[in-house]
Image: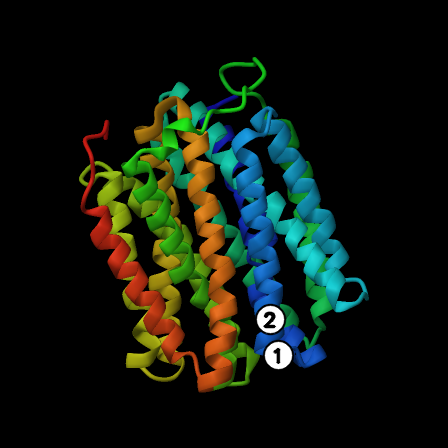
Amino acid sequence: MSAWASAVAGLAALAVALGIGRFAFTPILPMMQEDFGLSVSEAGWLASANYTGYLVGALSAIGLRLQPTVAIRAGLLVIGLSTLAMGLEHPFVISVVLLAVAGIASAWVLVFVSTWALERLAFLGRSKLGGAVYAGVGTGIVNAGGACLVLMSLHARSADAWLSLGVISIAVTAAIWPLLKAGPSRDPVPAPTASGIRRAEYRRLVLCYGAFGFGYVIPATFLPAMAKEIIPDPQLFGWAWPVFGAAAVISTVFAAQLERLLSHRALWIGGHLVMALGVVIPLIVRGLPGIMIAALLVGGTFMVITMAGMQVARTVAGPHARALMAAMTSAFALGQILGPVIVSLLVRSTGNFAPALVLAALMLAVSAISLLRKEKERE
């Protein structure tokens, strides 16, 4: 199979896993608020369920004894079925369970696509195509957000959005199924050891990636809801999420070209600083323009940070790369679990998003400073 075919398969898998399995809730949230009167607090708990599942999935990926392609296929199937099920009528607690299950599957796909695609592209001498693989997340966000924008303009219900995205997930999974072939080695994949992640440098990477999860989750989860508070017309506020996704697509391709000039760690640090600005920009630029600038800055950095972070893990950890990737993804998920809960508490006590946005920006800035320090590594 060619390098481009592998890159397309990775792109499509991440589009389903992250664009739908992890982030479909974000553009559908305003529709659910309209349909069911869903409160910010309830939205926070639903988001936390998805993030908790993501944490469980990332932790389990450390020792999962499966071929990467098997884990990817299983994850994609679970995402498609759980998304479809979200469109059916059921109690609130079932929605919590379904989003948690989708989170587990999404983490599997991210971790195993990262190991499978990066290894395969390196084997084929086309490592630069890694940017195309990670552009899949933004592609999924654009498509999911665009679909929800169309449905909102047609006054469709949130159930229609969940069912539509579930059908898309299953169709994409079926299309790329033949492309998900084993990597250079067809031997069973042993469970990677996690003993190396006790090093100080490994811990620093894990903590900084966790800070990224916390700092990023607030706009990533509540951006459309914040826009809806400013202007109720879905033809306007509904664009926040597609803009977010489009920025993610463009930024990963652009960042892949910058790798000739900057190290992966430098890209990671720059991503944190730009994202910190994006998180607080709605407090500086008021109204819908501030929301759209935030969508561009946060959307334009979150996948660059993901791509750079996974590359740093692969370079630093060597044969233990999957263990470090999974540990970093777990920290990211933990940050995202805490984020919506803290937002819910702060919004309830203050009545606005400002304190949560400032806290998120500070964590991103502090972690960027921490990343400036490093032990000697093979970068």
Q: Could you say whether the residue bearing mark 2 is in a helix, strand or loop? A: helix
Q: Nearer the viewer, residue 269 or 62?
A: 62
Q: Residue at x 44, y 46 (%)?
A: 135
Q: Nearer the viewer, residue 7 or 86?
A: 86
Q: Amino acid at mark 2?
A: Ala
Q: From what the image shows, is residue 177 above or below residue 43? A: above
The percent position of residue 53, horizontal first and vertical second, equals 60, 50
Q: Residue 196's image quarter?
A: top left
Answer left or right for 119 relative to 164. left
Q: Quadrant of the C terminus?
A: top left
Q: Is residue 197 visible?
A: yes
Q: Residue 30's image quarter?
A: bottom right
Q: Is residue 308 visible?
A: no
Answer left or right for 344 relative to 281. right
Contact between labelled residues 1 and 2, with CB atoms less than 8 Å apart = yes
The percent position of residue 116, horizontal first and vertical second, equals 49, 28
Q: Could you say whether the residue bearing mark 1 is in a helix, strand or loop? A: loop
Q: Residue at x 18, y 44 (%)?
A: 373
Q: From what the image shows, is residue 134 above or below residue 375? A: below
Residue pointed to by mark 2: 43
Q: Residue at x 45, y 56 (%)?
A: 335
Answer left or right for 250 relative to 54. left
Residue pointed to by mark 1: 39
Q: Local crowd at mark 1 within 10 Å, few (<14), some, or many (≥20)?
A: few
Q: Residue at x 66, y 73 (%)?
A: 32
Answer left or right for 289 relative to 108. left
The percent position of residue 46, horizontal first and vertical second, equals 62, 65
Q: Local crowd at mark 2 within 10 Å, few (<14), some, or many (≥20)?
A: many
Q: Nearer the viewer, residue 348 or 257?
A: 348
Marker count (numbered): 2
